[in-house]
């Protein structure tokens, strides 16, 4: 058994005997076998987990905070699902926009369908196992085959301690998309700017049936005292697609870990991300896309904009298995450093077992282009605004792929607020020129 050093881990010894009991026991056993990552862990080599172990996080209580932080919503018709410290809140949710046949249930109510809650024995991620063991609730959303394109779903994770003690929450989200259906989901993390720290250890599992399409996006806007870990596991069927974009803005320690299995011919994945960080913010993006069948395609584009003492890391992986002929896989990471103390790390990797493939990866880091800055200033734009426009254009190269438009606009507005750059017609014209 691994040493347990955090207060909320005491819950592993008193798991409730509920509908998820078997999954909890499997998760607890797996976590005990793996333990918390140490300094030599390749998977966590860039992360600063002392931000987790240095705070006495307690298990989140059942009661919610008296006052919840607010959050903006995407434009256009959409459904809203709200989880507060990992617990599904139907009273704060609004499902009216979803068509008949779409099923939304709390995790416990969907227990008979959630065998995937228990971590796979071959997965090397301890926080996935910890979530399986300690998830108190979550939400399962199922879209039947033949549903066509649905309105967007705004899935809000509220992270806020109800008392004076820092807390740990373990939300679980299950997404099932049937064939000939298109679902767009924005997972949006919001937290209180003041108050105790919250450790959010969230897991999203997704399955996309043949000819189905899942657009899964994340907007992570936690305060600087937060520790936020988001794991995604997706399985993609024949001629189906999984599109994902994560936007991380400041926060304390924020980490996304996305693993996608392209398990049938013609499956595709696009996994993108952008980090905007300043001061002591630290963001990690970890990916692994496995091509297990022929004629699969994948694309990864990650960009980091760092100021002050911020740090970001990208560890991207592609695995092409022996039967995955005609694979096309591409990775790219670019970092824009706005200060001398900012730091970025990039580690794209390829693991290929078939010689009939087209794969590439790239990694760049640098400062703002002086020629582009001169061009904008020559058009009468002040230096500060010109710099902001160039940074916005850099980040928007990732956000431009987000669909639908209402979700894209919400994420872009959040990025531009970080730049202190309100959108107007003049800025839009200058961005196009840049």
Image (cartoon, grey):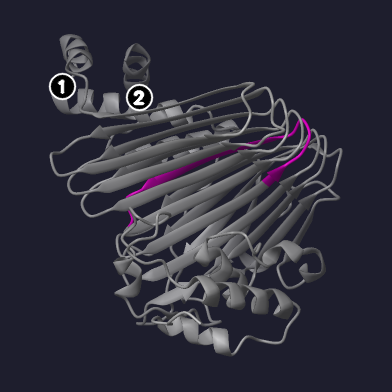
Q: Is residue 236 magenta?
A: yes
Relative to 414, does residue 398 appear above or below in the rendering?
above
Across and down, in percent, residue 126 comes to 51, 66
Q: Assess disc 2: are there few (<14), some (14-19) or many (≥20) residues with their C-alpha within 10 Å of its C-alpha.
A: some
Which quarter of the picture shows residue 53?
bottom left
Which quarter of the picture shows residue 164?
bottom left
Per the rendered image, the range of residues in magenta is: 235-251
Q: Mark 1 points at which residue?
A: 382
Relative to 170, does residue 433 appear above or below in the rendering?
above
Across and down, in percent, residue 370 comes to 17, 17
* Mark 2: secondary structure: helix
* Mark 1: secondary structure: loop
Q: Residue 393 carries which label?
A: 2
Query: On the rendered structure, is 382 left or right of 90?
Result: left
Q: Nearer the viewer, mark 1 or mark 2?
A: 2
Query: On the rendered structure, is 65 left or right of 233?
Result: left
Q: Nearer the viewer, residue 290 or 179?
A: 290
Query: On the rendered structure, is 181 left or right of 192?
Result: right
The residue sitting at 36% across, 64% down in the picture is 226
Query: On the rendered structure, is 386 left or right of 87?
Result: left
Q: Which of 65 and 118 is in front in this view?
A: 118
Across and down, in percent, residue 58 comes to 43, 82
Q: Distance between the residues labelled 1 and 2?
A: 16 Å
- Residue 196 visible, this orientation: no
| SS assignment for the magenta stretch, majority | strand
Across and down, in percent, residue 346 comes to 35, 39
Q: Is residue 111 magenta?
A: no
């Amino acid at each position: 058994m691994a040493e347990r050093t955090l207060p909320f881990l005491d819950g592993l010894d008193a798991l409730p005997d509920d509908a998820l009991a078997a999954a909890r026991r499997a998760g607890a056993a797996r976590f005990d076998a793996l333990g918390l990552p140490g300094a030599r862990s390749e998977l966590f080599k860039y992360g600063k987990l002392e931000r987790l172990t240095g705070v006495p996080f307690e298990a989140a209580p059942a009661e919610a905070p008296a006052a919840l932080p607010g959050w903006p919503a995407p434009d256009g018709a959409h459904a809203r699902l709200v989880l507060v410290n990992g617990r599904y809140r139907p009273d704060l949710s609004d499902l009216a926009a979803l068509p008949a046949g779409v099923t939304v249930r709390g995790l416990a109510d969907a227990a008979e369908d959630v065998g995937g809650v228990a971590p796979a024995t071959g997965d090397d991620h301890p926080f996935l196992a910890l979530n399986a063991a300690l998830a108190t609730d979550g939400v399962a959303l199922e879209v039947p085959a033949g549903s066509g394109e649905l309105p967007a779903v705004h899935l809000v994770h509220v992270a806020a301690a109800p008392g004076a003690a820092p807390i740990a929450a373990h939300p679980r989200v299950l997404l099932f998309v049937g064939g000939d259906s298109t679902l767009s989901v924005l997972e949006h993390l919001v937290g209180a700017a003041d108050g105790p720290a919250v450790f959010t250890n969230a897991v999203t599992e997704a399955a996309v049936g043949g000819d189905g399409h899942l657009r899964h996006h994340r907007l992570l806007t936690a305060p600087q005292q937060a520790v936020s870990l988001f794991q995604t596991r997706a399985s993609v069927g024949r001629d189906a697609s999984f599109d994902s974009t994560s936007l991380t803005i400041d926060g304390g320690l924020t980490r996304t870990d996305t693993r996608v299995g392209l398990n049938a011919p013609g499956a595709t994945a696009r996994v993108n991300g952008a980090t905007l960080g300043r001061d002591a913010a630290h963001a990690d993006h970890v990916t692994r896309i496995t091509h297990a069948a022929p004629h699969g395609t994948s694309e990864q584009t990650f960009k980091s904009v760092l100021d002050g003492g911020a740090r970001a890391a990208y560890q991207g992986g592609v695995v092409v298995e022996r039967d995955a002929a005609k694979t096309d896989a591409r990775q790219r990471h670019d970092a824009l450093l706005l200060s001398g103390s900012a730091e970025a790390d990039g580690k794209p990797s390829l693991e290929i077992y078939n010689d009939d493939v087209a794969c590439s990866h790239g990694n760049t880091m640098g400062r703002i282009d002086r020629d582009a800055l001169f061009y904008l200033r020559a058009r009468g734009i002040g230096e500060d605004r010109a710099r902001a426009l160039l940074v916005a254009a850099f980040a928007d190269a990732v956000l431009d792929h987000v669909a639908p438009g209402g979700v894209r606009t919400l994420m872009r507005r959040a990025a531009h607020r970080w730049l202190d750059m309100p959108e107007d017609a003049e800025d839009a014209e200058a961005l196009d020129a840049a």
